[in-house]
Amino acid sequence: MTNNSSIDNQQQKGGNQLTPEQRKEELTKCILSQYRLCAAGTIGGAGFSVLRSQSVRPTAWPMLGGAFVGTLGDFVYGYFVECASLRTEGDSLVGSNNDKKS
């Protein structure tokens, strides 16, 4: 946690102080820290398998399917919403590097 707070302090003091490697690492951490939709999919799938009227014994497939769909949703939500600031700063950084090379 101290590493993240030091990076936050650097961003507040000097703007873009992250190297491309640090930005990539932070973006990865941010995307992988998303769990809400996976948990919701797992709980929803478990509830569906228990309450399903066609089977007496609940199966794990609806729960696994819900977890899989939730995980995909977490990655998409994390990339486009939660971690968008890291992604767009990285895109602008890449664009500025390409402009300097030209």
Image (cartoon, rainbow, N blue to C red):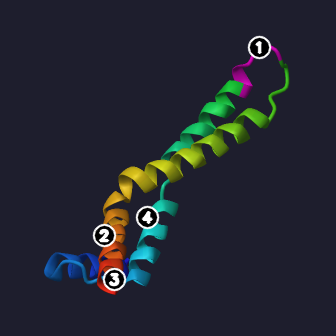
Q: CA distance from mark 1 to mark 3?
A: 65 Å
In this rendering, the label closer to the viewer, 1 or 3: 3
Q: Secondary structure at mark 3?
A: loop
> According to the image, label 2 marks what residue?
92
Nearer the N terminus, badge 1 or badge 3?
1
> According to the image, label 4 marks what residue?
30
Numbered mark located on residue 102 in the image: 3
Q: Are marks 3 and 2 in contact (CB under 8 Å)?
A: no
Q: CA distance from mark 2 to mark 4?
A: 18 Å
Kindly indicate the quadrant of the structure image that contains residue 102.
bottom left
Three-letter code, disc 4: Cys
> According to the image, label 1 marks what residue?
53
Nearer the N terminus, badge 1 or badge 2?
1
Three-letter code, disc 2: Ser
How many marks are shown on the rendered structure?
4
In this rendering, the label closer to the viewer, 2 or 4: 2
Which residue sits furthest front?
102
Q: Secondary structure at mark 2?
A: helix
Q: Is residue 77 left or right of residue 65?
A: left
Three-letter code, disc 1: Ser
Q: Residue at x 85, y 19 (%)?
A: 56
Tell me the magenta residue range: 49-54
